[in-house]
Image: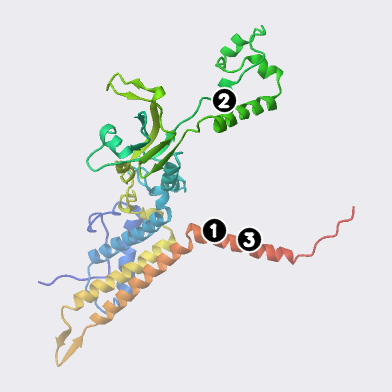
């Protein structure tokens, strides 16, 4: 069968490319015929036949535009992924200015806040440990298995244990109490009724109140039992040993104890769970919502790269076609085809074009531009330092 090859002219119409990504874009339709003519002439037409059809040129042109878009948007993803991760994946990022944000950095640093007890994404639970008379040591792992509703193999980690004596101000003896000042009801309205009567706040210097409060707290530390605890590997030791004087009977268990010790803890399985609900969110680079580029808005720099890459693809296709027959017999001689030359040239051209495009993108990265701006500022400062200073006479 005699398959027609390039005749020197073409007429592009939608549907002549394999995927049709850009068939309905006006500039792509106009440039398709020009690119076909450009590639054919660069391959030797009309001095030599080019064993390609117009559809071959259109296919190479579509692939070149798609490759350009892939490289461009891959660069955009690398440059901005920390800001894009976790964003919505339901809307395209094409033709949108990507503004850097702190969301990714905050998400990374939340774990530090979690360990410090000032944030994070792991829930802190509250527990109550009944202190038993005469028992100083408590196994919190045993408490967790009995009371924390743990799943199989899970365990807890205690984060904070509370023991706070009543505030010193509540034990502040006010020598002015009962003097008939009539201010107690007023202070009740502000929630200060259990504290010192209002006249003491109004009549006495503030430094006097501070010294009295410190004296009460120091008295508790030196003259009374200093309540504290020691926690090692979830084994809790309380000081002093709970006494028998505070025993009372728990109505639910019928056992006697000395009150509850309050603490906060986390479940280790929740800390070790790295997954966050990612429905309709960007969770990896393949989900960043970039579509194929709009050829109509690609500038002349990008289009020239696309034209050259199209030519490289056409060289590759022509090389494979001519490789079907290494030599062609003619009367009294043979013609050797240039398959290897075409394939070698196509491979070198494609690699060089990709490296050039990536280098161009890297030179325009946010980091590189800021470095250049800083360097420019340094040079300007050095240049201005050479300008003679004007002597001002008032």
Query: Which mark sits nearer the N-terminus, 3 or 1?
Result: 1
Alpha carbons under labels 1 and 2: distance apart: 57 Å
The residue sitting at 56% across, 14% down in the picture is 193
> Which residue occupies the extreme left position in the image?
1
Label disc, if present, on residue 377 of the rendered structure: 3
Determine which residue is flagged by label 1: 370
Label disc, if present, on residue 168 of the rendered structure: 2
Q: Secondary structure at mark 1?
A: helix
Front residue of 241 and 39: 241
User: How many numbered marks have been drawn onto this rendered protein structure?
Assistant: 3
1 and 2 marks in contact (CB < 8 Å): no
Front residue of 32 and 383: 383
Q: Is residue 103 above or below residue 59?
A: above
Please rate how many residues cluster around mark 1, counting C-alpha atoms within 10 Å: few if below 14, some from 14 to 19, many from 20: few
Eye-nearest disc, 2 or 3: 2
Q: Is residue 261 above or below residue 235?
A: above
| Residue 19 image position (x, y, % from top left) | 24, 56
Label disc, if present, on residue 219 of the rendered structure: none
Query: Which mark sits nearer the N-terminus, 1 or 2?
Result: 2
Q: Is residue 312 above or below residue 22?
A: below
2 and 3 marks in contact (CB < 8 Å): no
Position of the N terminus by quadrant: bottom left
The residue sitting at 34% across, 53% down in the picture is 26
Which quadrant of the figure has residue 181?
top right
Front residue of 185 and 317: 185
Task: Using residue 377 as the reference point, say whether residue 7 is left or right of it.
Answer: left
| Residue 41 image position (x, y, % from top left) | 32, 74
Query: Which mark sits nearer the N-terminus, 2 or 3?
Result: 2
Please rate how many residues cluster around mark 3, counting C-alpha atoms within 10 Å: few if below 14, some from 14 to 19, many from 20: few
Q: Is residue 276 visible?
A: no
Which quadrant of the figure has residue 120?
top left
Q: Secondary structure at mark 3?
A: helix
């Amino acid at each position: 069968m005699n398959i027609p090859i390039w005749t020197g002219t073409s007429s592009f119409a939608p549907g002549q490319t394999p995927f049709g990504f850009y068939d309905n874009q006006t500039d792509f339709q106009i440039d398709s015929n020009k690119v076909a003519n450009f590639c054919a002439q660069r391959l030797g037409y009309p001095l030599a036949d080019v064993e390609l059809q117009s559809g071959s040129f259109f296919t190479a042109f579509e692939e070149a535009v798609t490759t350009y878009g892939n490289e461009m948007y891959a660069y955009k993803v690398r440059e901005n992924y920390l800001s894009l991760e976790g964003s919505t994946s339901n809307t395209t990022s094409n033709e949108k200015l990507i503004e850097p944000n702190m969301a990714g950095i905050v998400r990374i640093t939340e774990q530090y806040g979690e360990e410090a007890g000032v944030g994070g994404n792991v829930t802190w639970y509250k527990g109550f440990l009944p202190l038993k008379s005469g028992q100083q040591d408590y196994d919190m792992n045993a408490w967790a298995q009995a009371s924390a509703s743990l799943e199989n193999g899970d365990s807890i980690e205690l984060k904070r244990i509370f023991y706070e004596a009543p505030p010193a101000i509540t034990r502040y003896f006010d020598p002015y109490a009962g003097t008939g000042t009539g201010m107690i009801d007023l202070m009740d309205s502000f929630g200060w009724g259990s504290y010192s009567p209002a006249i003491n706040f109004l009549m006495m210097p503030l430094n006097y109140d501070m010294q009295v409060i410190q004296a009460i707290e120091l008295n508790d530390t030196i003259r009374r039992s200093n309540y504290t605890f020691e926690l090692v590997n979830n084994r809790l030791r309380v000081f002093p040993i709970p006494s028998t004087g505070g025993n009372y009977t728990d109505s639910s268990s019928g056992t006697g104890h000395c009150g509850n010790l309050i603490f906060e803890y986390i479940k280790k399985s929740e800390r070790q769970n790295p997954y966050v609900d990612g429905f309709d969110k960007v969770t990896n680079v393949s989900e960043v919502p970039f579509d194929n580029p709009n050829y109509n808005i690609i500038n002349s720099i990008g289009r020239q790269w696309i034209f050259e890459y199209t030519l490289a693809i056409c060289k590759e296709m022509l090389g494979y076609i001519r490789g079907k027959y290494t030599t062609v017999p003619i009367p009294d001689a043979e013609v050797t085809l240039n398959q290897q030359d075409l394939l070698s040239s196509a491979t070198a051209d494609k690699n060089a074009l990709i490296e050039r495009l990536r280098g161009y993108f890297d030179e325009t990265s946010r980091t590189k531009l800021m470095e250049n701006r800083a360097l420019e500022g340094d040079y300007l400062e050095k240049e201005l330092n050479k300008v003679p200073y004007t002597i001002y006479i008032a």
